[in-house]
Image: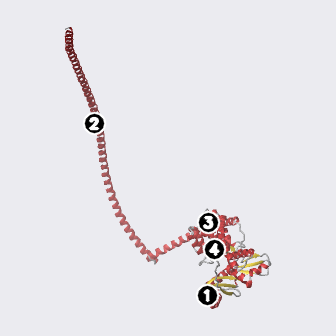
């Protein structure tokens, strides 16, 4: 019973607690809701107040901005009104000025019209006066013609002729005086320049002979040079075109030939043959050919040495080689290379004294006789050949004109060309420089060889024995033995008809056939 009672009391207590808790929680919940509502209402009120404040501030800012913009626009409007007023004042002033100018222009036009009227009146009066004057002059001329018996045109012609003659006489006197003064001054200055150039150029006398002497180790070598039945000496003379004179001179033989280049080849070849000891036709031809090739290379060295001596650079290889060949060319007995170097020095010195380009002057002087290197083997004068060489090798117009005019074939176009003429004359006219007889002799030998070579079928021709003999080598496949007899007669006849020479000339035609094969 007691347990039931406890249970009932516990249940009742629990129910009461539940009910009390429910009421308590409901009461507490109502308080929180009320509190939240109050807080929300407060937030809303605060937001309304803040929004109201912001609205008032923005309204105030907008009003201030409106007042500021309005003030700015008012100021700008005032400024523009002021500018407009200034422009209007300027325009008004300009209108006043234009009105004044128009008034002045109107006044000027009236004045010009008055002047034109006066000018026209004067022109009319002048025209009348001119007509009256012409009439009076015509009347006077007619009276003068009647009195003098000379027409107007004839009188004019006589008067003009007298005036022209007087003017010519006066001009001629003035020109003569000027020329005389200039000639005296020029002659004096030219003599001083030439004397200075000659004094500063010391050159040796450079005459050449037509023989070379080759020393031998013994007289027994002469027999080996001659060979069996003379075959060695004939082969040597045929290969070189130089005559070998074997006489009683002890331990020496003489090489005779007018061409120094051929004679130099023969001298070197013979010296090598004598030194080697093997002398026979095949060896002779081999050595001569080798010496020719070596001497071709030596020409370049000689040309370079001449250019270095004069101080010239930038020269074409062809001209360098031709300069070297001038060493073996003589003109009236004077070595042409030494002559050209001397002319280059003289021209350079005179050009420098006159204020011209000394290097260009030396270049023109050195190349003035370049055509003589090949004129014996090429058609044309050495001047024409030199012009072609200079143009082909890119030399300038001054150098070309100096070459063309140094013998007065053409007119000089530059003072350097005249200086080259003077230097050429100085170099050739100094005592001992040239021998006229030697040059004439060489020209005769050259003509003798050229006459022989002019016949068809002739391969080579060599003038030997001082021009007393011409040896002609023919091509065996074009000339047979009977034709050789006819050819020798034709050559002799042509020499008689076209040349002048002392004594007689022996013509020898040689026809030779060679068959060569090599055993391998």
Tell me if residue 160 is in the magenta stretch: no
Structural distance between the alpha carbons of marks 3 and 1? 52 Å
**20 on left or right of 325:** left
Which circle's residue, 1 or 4, is located before the other in the chain? 4
* Residue that numbered label 1 is attached to: 479
Q: Name the residue under label 3.
A: 361
Tell me the magenta residue range.
75-80
Query: For the residues carrying marks 4 and 2, which lies nearer the camera in this image?
Result: 4
- Residue 331 percent across, percent down from the top left: 67, 75
Between the C-alphas of marks 4 and 2, the distance is 103 Å
Few, some or many residues within 10 Å of mark 2 (<14, 14–19, 20+): few
Which residue extends farthest front?
A: 1
Q: Are marks 4 and 3 in contact (CB under 8 Å)?
A: no
Q: Is label 1 in a helix, a strand or a loop?
A: loop
The residue tagged 2 is 77
Q: Nearer the viewer, residue 481 or 105?
A: 481
Element at badge 3?
helix
**Dot 3 alpha-carbon crowd within 10 angstroms: few under 14, some 14 to 19, many 20 or more:** many
């Amino acid at each position: 019973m007691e347990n039931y009672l406890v249970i009932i009391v516990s249940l009742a207590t629990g129910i009461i607690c539940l009910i009390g808790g429910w009421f308590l929680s409901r009461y507490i919940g109502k308080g929180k809701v009320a509190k939240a509502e109050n807080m929300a209402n407060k937030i809303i009120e605060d937001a309304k107040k803040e929004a109201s404040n912001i609205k008032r501030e923005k309204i105030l800012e907008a009003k201030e901005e409106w007042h500021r913009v309005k003030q700015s626009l008012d100021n700008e409007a005032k400024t523009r009104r002021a500018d407009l007023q200034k422009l209007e004042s300027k325009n008004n002033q300009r209108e006043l000025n234009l009105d004044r100018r128009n008034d002045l222009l109107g006044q000027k036009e009236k004045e010009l019209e008055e002047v034109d009227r006066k000018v026209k009146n004067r022109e009319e009066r002048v025209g009348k006066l001119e007509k009256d004057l012409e009439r009076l002059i015509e009347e006077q001329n007619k009276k003068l013609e009647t009195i003098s018996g000379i027409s107007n045109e004839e009188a004019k012609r006589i008067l003009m002729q007298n005036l022209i003659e007087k003017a010519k006489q006066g001009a001629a006197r003035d020109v003569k005086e000027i020329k005389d003064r200039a000639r005296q001054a020029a002659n004096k200055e030219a003599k001083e320049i030439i004397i200075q150039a000659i004094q500063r150029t010391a050159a040796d006398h450079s005459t050449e002979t037509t023989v070379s002497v080759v020393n031998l180790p013994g007289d027994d070598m002469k027999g080996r040079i001659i060979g069996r039945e003379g075959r060695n000496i004939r082969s040597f003379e045929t290969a070189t075109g130089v005559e070998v004179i074997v006489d009683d001179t002890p331990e020496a033989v003489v090489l005779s030939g007018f061409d120094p280049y051929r004679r130099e080849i023969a001298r070197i070849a013979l010296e090598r043959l004598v030194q080697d000891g093997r002398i026979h036709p095949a060896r002779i031809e081999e050595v001569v050919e080798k010496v020719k090739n070596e001497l071709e290379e030596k020409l370049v060295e000689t040309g370079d040495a001449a250019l270095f001596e004069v101080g010239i650079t930038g020269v074409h290889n062809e001209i360098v080689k031709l300069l070297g060949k001038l060493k073996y060319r003589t003109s009236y007995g004077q070595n042409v290379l030494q002559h050209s170097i001397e002319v280059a020095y003289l021209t350079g010195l005179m050009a420098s004294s006159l204020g011209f380009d000394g290097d260009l002057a030396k270049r023109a002087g050195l190349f003035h006789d370049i055509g003589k290197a090949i004129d014996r083997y090429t058609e044309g004068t050495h001047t024409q050949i030199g012009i072609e060489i200079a143009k082909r090798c890119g030399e300038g117009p001054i150098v070309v004109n100096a070459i063309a005019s140094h013998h007065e074939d053409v007119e000089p176009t530059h003072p350097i060309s005249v200086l080259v003429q003077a230097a050429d004359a100085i170099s050739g006219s100094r005592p001992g420089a040239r021998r006229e007889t030697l040059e004439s002799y060489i020209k005769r030998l050259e003509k003798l060889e050229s006459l022989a070579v002019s016949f068809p079928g002739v391969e080579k021709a060599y003038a030997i024995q001082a021009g007393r003999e011409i040896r002609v080598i023919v091509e065996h496949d074009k000339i047979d033995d009977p034709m050789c007899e006819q050819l020798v007669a034709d050559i002799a006849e042509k020499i008689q008809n076209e040349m002048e020479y002392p004594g007689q000339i022996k013509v020898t035609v040689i026809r030779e056939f060679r068959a060569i094969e090599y055993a391998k």
